[in-house]
Structure formats: structure tokens, C-alpha cells
Amino acid sequence: MRQYRVAIVGATGMVGQEFIKVLEQRNFPMTSIRLLASDRSAGKKLFVTHQEIEVKEAVPESFKGIDIALFSAGTETSRHFSPIASKSGAVVIDNSSAFRMYPEVPLVVPEVNPEDIKWHKGIIANPNCSTIQMVVALYPLHKVNPIKRIVVDSYQAVSGTGSAAVEELTTQAKQVLEGQSTIPHVYPHQIAFNVLPEIDVFLDNGYTREEWKLVEETRKIMHTDDIAISATCVRVPVYTGHSEAIHVEFSRPMSPDEARHILAHAPGVKVLDDPTISLYPQPWSVVDTDEVFIGRIRRDASHSCGLTIWVVADNLRKGAALNAVQIAEEMIKREWIHPGG
Ligand SMILES: NC(=O)c1ccc[n+]([C@@H]2O[C@H](COP(=O)([O-])OP(=O)(O)OC[C@H]3O[C@@H](n4cnc5c(N)ncnc54)[C@H](OP(=O)(O)O)[C@@H]3O)[C@@H](O)[C@H]2O)c1
């Protein structure tokens, strides 16, 4: 099997660490791995497949001789280094929102639109974490019975914001339990023992940018402008695992049993749905798993063509690192990438 030279930009971050784990666990065919971060982490040592590797500061020369560059270092870093990496001959798979809506950049979830990878021009975008798990769950149903409208409410974990937010939740939880006051740094308000209906900035239309990403990205990935979508994204005091309550209106009625049957055979999906034993997906139990978990499948009492479902996935894996690695694997499987260009 051909082997590839891989770089991770943002290797010391939450998603970067998950990239390393996913590449190891899936025996990704690599001859070498370059770990890149900011100057703050240069010189730090990380282990990849039992080998100690020094983290280097990302500079324009970092991408020479790289076949696949996995980016998870924020929008600004992606904007700056992705075109440089691409010019150096690497295929960039970018986790940030920098290029997702560019018409010339494919936005890919391998279970939904793998064919889009083919028309990339050097950069492929990984969608937002809450979008990925929603389209993996809905696309198999949409293929059978086209979706007309989606109303989604998300319950998003703090690891979606990065390592500083994880620390903030721990610190604040201790402070609250010890009767001390908390000072928010990462979020506008205390996150411990609280929920915040604000993820990313507010837009002029009253939605947040996170909510609007769900709207626009879903349409781009599913190749349709016809689905009406409304979202409310909420940050919750959970470390890892995003949850979503999704209300879907189809073109025709669909029974919960039919949906369960379709989803049971859908790629990347696991149905956990038995209310008699309180069986449904929970963020705590999906950590470190690859699938998108679905439960609470029921008729929407407010619409004859409606279903309501509950969807949970590990935001650092399927919502970020795993999806990006699956894009690379898809390119390799279809022979759309060759080592050395
Ligand atoms: N967390 C999620 O669930 C999730 C899901 C989808 C997408 N994403 C996206 O993935 C990216 C990273 O998220 P994260 O959660 O891993 O954040 P994080 O834990 O805060 O890590 C940020 C990483 O970026 C690096 N970095 C920052 N500035 C840099 C620069 N100028 N040059 C090179 N590296 C730089 C940091 O390196 P230092 O150690 O040197 O500071 C660190 O490795 C973001 O764009 C985020 O939107 C995250």
C-alpha cells in the first residue's frame, strides 16, 4: 500500500490530539508525520505510534514534502497557511470555517457527498461538528423521502471550543462547589451548572454564526437549497459529545419504524432506541466512539409528515478529526491522491 507524508497543524490542541489518536488507531498509511503548532508549543514532544516527535512552529517551509496537511489551528492560521501548503503540493483538509462556503472548496462528509472530494483544488473543508452529525443522521432518510424542513436545537460540549474551555468548565465547577464566585474568560457567562444559548457571534438576523453554519453547510453538503432550516445552538456544561434534538418534516409521512429500519442500515450510524429501558444516546457514553448515535425516534405530534429524533456524537472525533481522516482515506481508496503529488 502507498504511504503518505502527513502534517498536523494544531497538533497540540484538542482536535490535533484526536488526529494523532485516530491516525494511530486506523493504521493510516504514513511514512512520516510532522507536528506543527504556534511558537508557544515549539520544542514540546508528543508520541505518535510510540515514537517521540518534536512539535515545530508552523512556518511557510513546514509544508515542503508533505502529501496531506490536516489543519485544526483556527481560522486565521488556516487562512494564512492553507494556500501555502496547497502550493507546496499538499492536499489540505481544513477543520476551520475559513473556506467552507467557498464555491471552489468541497465541504465533505464521506457518508453523504464523497464524490465532491474529486473536484478539490488543493483545499477540502471539514464541516462544523454539529453539521456533520446532523447530515449523517438525516441524509439516509432524505434519500428515501426528501426533507422539506428541519428545526434543530443543539446541546454542545465545551471541548468544541478548545482546550481553554475544558479547563474553564473544570475550574468553575470546583469554584461553584466550594462556594466561590467565578470569572468567565472563554464564554460571556459562567458555563458550570449553566447553559448558554450563544455559540460564536450574533448576526444581524438574530441567529448566531454557529446556527447559520448549520443552515448553510447542510444545504451545501446535501446539494439542496430547498430545505428550510432553523437552528438554536446551546453550549452546555458537558466536556465532550454534542447532542441534537431534530424535528424533520418530510415530503410524505414516514413512520418511526421505517426511519429506524433505514438508519439501522445507514453508514456511520448506530440506532440506540428503546424507551422501555431508557435506552437513548448520551454524550457521556459516546466519547471515543466513531458513530453518530440516534434515538428517541418518534412521530412529530405537530405535523403529519414529521419525525423527531435525538442525535449524539463525539464532536472531537466524527465532528472533527475522524471526519477529516475519513476524507483522506476516501481519497486514497479512490486513488485521487498520490504520494509525492
Ligand atoms: N473542538 C472541536 O470539537 C472542533 C470541531 C470542529 C472544528 N474545530 C476547529 O478546529 C480548530 C482547533 O480547535 P481545537 O478545539 O483543537 O482548539 P485548541 O484546543 O484551542 O487548539 C488550538 C491549536 O491551534 C494551534 N495554533 C494556534 N495558533 C496557531 C498559529 N498561529 N500557528 C500554528 N498553530 C496555532 C495551537 O497551538 P499552541 O499549542 O502552540 O497554542 C493548538 O495546537 C478550530 O479552528 C476549531 O474551530 C474544532
Image (tube, helix red, strand yellow):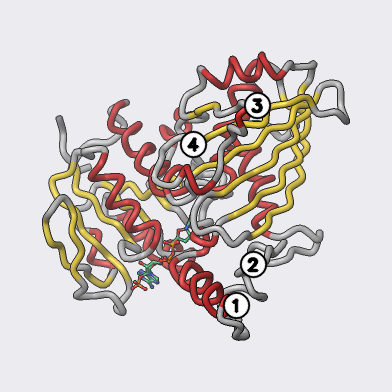
Instruction: Tell me which numbered mark, 2 or 1, is placed earlier along the sequence.
Output: 1
Q: Which residue is mark 3?
A: 276
| Real-space CA distance between mark 2 and mark 3, rounded to the nearest whole angstrom | 29 Å
Please state the quadrant of the image where ligand 1 appears. Answer: bottom left
Crowd rating for badge 2 (residues with CA inside 10 Å; few <14, some 14–19, many 20+): few
Q: Nearer the viewer, mark 4 or mark 3?
A: 3
Instruction: Tell me which numbered mark, 4 or 2, is placed earlier along the sequence.
Output: 4
Image coordinates of residue 36 in percent, x first then y, are 27, 65
Q: Secondary structure at mark 1?
A: helix
Q: Amino acid at mark 3?
A: Thr
Instruction: Tell me which numbered mark, 4 or 3, is placed earlier along the sequence.
Output: 4
Instruction: Tell me which numbered mark, 3 or 1, is placed earlier along the sequence.
Output: 1
Q: Amino acid at mark 4?
A: Val
The residue at 32%/57% (across/down) is 17
Image coordinates of residue 71 in percent, x first then y, are 37, 56
Q: Looking at the rendering, which quadrant does residue 7 occupy?
A: bottom left
Query: Which quadrant holds the N terminus?
Result: top left
The numbered disc on residue 176 is 1
The numbered disc on residue 109 is 4
Q: Is residue 181 above or below residue 197?
A: below
Q: Is residue 72 above or below residue 253?
A: below
Question: Ligand 1: does it lie within 8 Å of the C-beta at label 3?
Answer: no
Question: Ligand 1: does it lie within 8 Å of the C-beta at label 1?
Answer: no
Q: Secondary structure at mark 2?
A: loop
| Real-space CA distance between mark 4 and mark 3, rounded to the nearest whole angstrom | 33 Å
Q: Are marks 2 and 1 in contact (CB under 8 Å)?
A: yes
The residue at 22%/52% (across/down) is 66
The residue at 61%/83% (across/down) is 179
The numbered disc on residue 95 is none
The numbered disc on residue 193 is 2
Q: Amino acid at mark 2?
A: Phe
